[in-house]
Image (tube, helix red, strand yellow):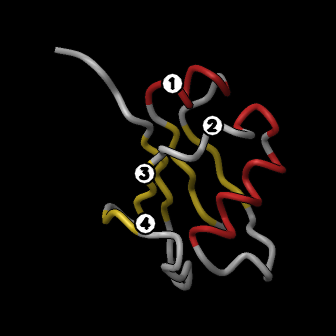
Amino acid sequence: MVQVLYFAALRDLLGLSEETLEIPEHVRTVGAFVLYLQQARPALSGKMASVRVALDEAFAGDSELLDGVHTIALIPPVAGG
């Protein structure tokens, strides 16, 4: 089980800021998790290309393994000034 945190536009899109998910065994990398999440949460489909992923408070690339991860944060780009 991991805690998934949604920020900014993703939080608004889903109507929640966090949830706990049980990730299937075959989902072992950040890239696989993003694909899985888009299937599990269809509202995210096509909206994850520019989203940064952090594993336990450290940014991670698509090939990063999820082993031992407790928190996954999804951070979309934000604009402002």
Q: How many labels does the image show?
A: 4
Residue that carries the numbered disc 1 in the rendered image: 9
Residue drawn at (67%, 68%), measured in percent from left and top? 1
Q: Do the residues labelled 3 and 4 touch (CB within 8 Å)?
A: no
Residue that carries the numbered disc 2 in the rendered image: 47
Residue drawn at (74%, 68%), measured in percent from left and top? 23
Residue that carries the numbered disc 4 in the rendered image: 55
Name the N-terminal-most of marks 3 and 2: 2
Q: Position of residue 77 (x, y in %)?
A: 38, 34
Q: How far apart are marks 3 and 2 (CA)?
A: 11 Å
Please tell me which residue lies in front, 49 or 33: 49
Image mark for residue 52: 3
Residue drawn at (52%, 39%), measured in percent from left and top? 6
Helix, strand or loop for disc 1: helix
Q: Are marks 2 and 1 in contact (CB under 8 Å)?
A: yes
Helix, strand or loop for disc 3: strand
Give the mark toward the camera: 4 or 2.
2
